[in-house]
Amino acid sequence: MAPLNIAPEFAAQPPGAHLRPIPIRERTRVNSVIIERDGTTTNVNEPAARLSAGEWAALHRELDSAVRDIDADWLVVGGAMPAAHGTDAAPAEVRPFAELAERTGARLALDLPAATLGDWLAQGVRPHLIAPNIEELRELTGRRIPTIGAAVDAAFALLRSGVEHVFATLGHRGVLLVSRTAQHWARTAPVRPVNTTGAGDATLAGLLHGWRGDGDPDAVRAALATAVRFGRAAVLTASPTINPEVIPSVPVEIGEPVPTARLD
């Protein structure tokens, strides 16, 4: 769910897309990705358009309707949050998202920049899952994280704030899913990336695609395998999207984290 100016490219969505454009006064931002021959990726991102109180209200109404219409298992809030209208830095309010998740029974997942995520956690929100990358995990905890064991320790520090699951993406070292009762490390053979932009989003989508957030070991393992395959597919394409129906079923190793394994 994203606030978007009404435009022709969004007027005719394919069945099942569930995208609901919301008109706003400010221009929709444009993000650019520069991909060099050696695979080096540079992102040039504009700040998110600021929303008025009325535009935020429209977003929350549409979001409530969308969650109910599809009986959503997850409510994912991700990306750079717009500032409040008339200010330069006021963050979006977390309470409406948390209250919506509670009303509808959807599990709340946060995939946000470290500064925003840290602020929202400090306000007392208790999401079912957060999805930091390794740099965001370092920023959130103020720790050096040279090993898998250090990453697990950092995840436990965030669990103590009330988070139920930490899903950390570690680049070529795979992903960690950490809860109070179980820790999983999933990875596949490294590949030479074409474009890393959107890989974290694809990985999270793969995790949530077939998992409802419970502790069933088989469901967790299947979700982690899908997450790694989605992320792998994303870094192997220059386009911003992947087709879940044609993703190769490559082998994925899933087991307990190896504390001494290096992240560099």
Image (cartoon, helix red, strand yellow):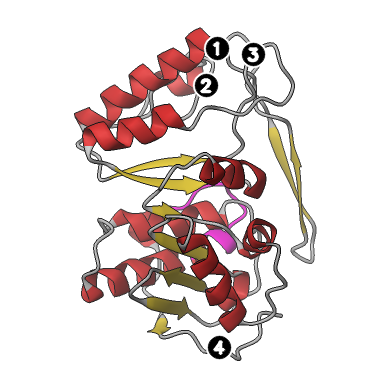
Q: Main secondary structure of the magenta part?
A: loop
| Numbered disc 2: secondary structure | loop
Say above or below: 48 vs 244.
Answer: above
Give the CA distance from mark 1 to mark 2.
7 Å
Task: Tell me the amino acid under the disc marked 2.
Answer: Leu
SS class, disc 4: loop
What percent of the width, then of the height, locates residue 47?
A: 71, 30
Q: Which mark is residue 159?
A: none
Q: Is residue 76 above or below residue 142?
A: above
Which one is in front, 63 or 201? 63
Residue bearing mark 1 = 24
Give the residue drawn at x 63%, y 46%.
Answer: 113
User: Disc 1 or 3, which lies upstream in sequence?
Assistant: 1
* Residue marked by disc 3: 85
- The residue to which callout 2 is attached is 4
Q: What secondary structure is found at the residue carrying circle 1?
A: loop
Real-space CA distance between mark 3 and mark 4, rounded to the nearest whole angstrom: 46 Å
| Residue at mark 4 to residue at mark 1: CA–CA distance | 48 Å
In this rendering, position of residue 171 left or right of residue 224? right
Q: Nearer the viewer, mark 3 or mark 2?
A: 3
Instruction: Assess disc 2: are there few (<14), some (14-19) or many (≥20) residues with their C-alpha within 10 Å of its C-alpha.
Output: many
- State the extent of the magenta-drawn residues as a range: 233-243
The one nearer the camera, 13 or 165, is: 165
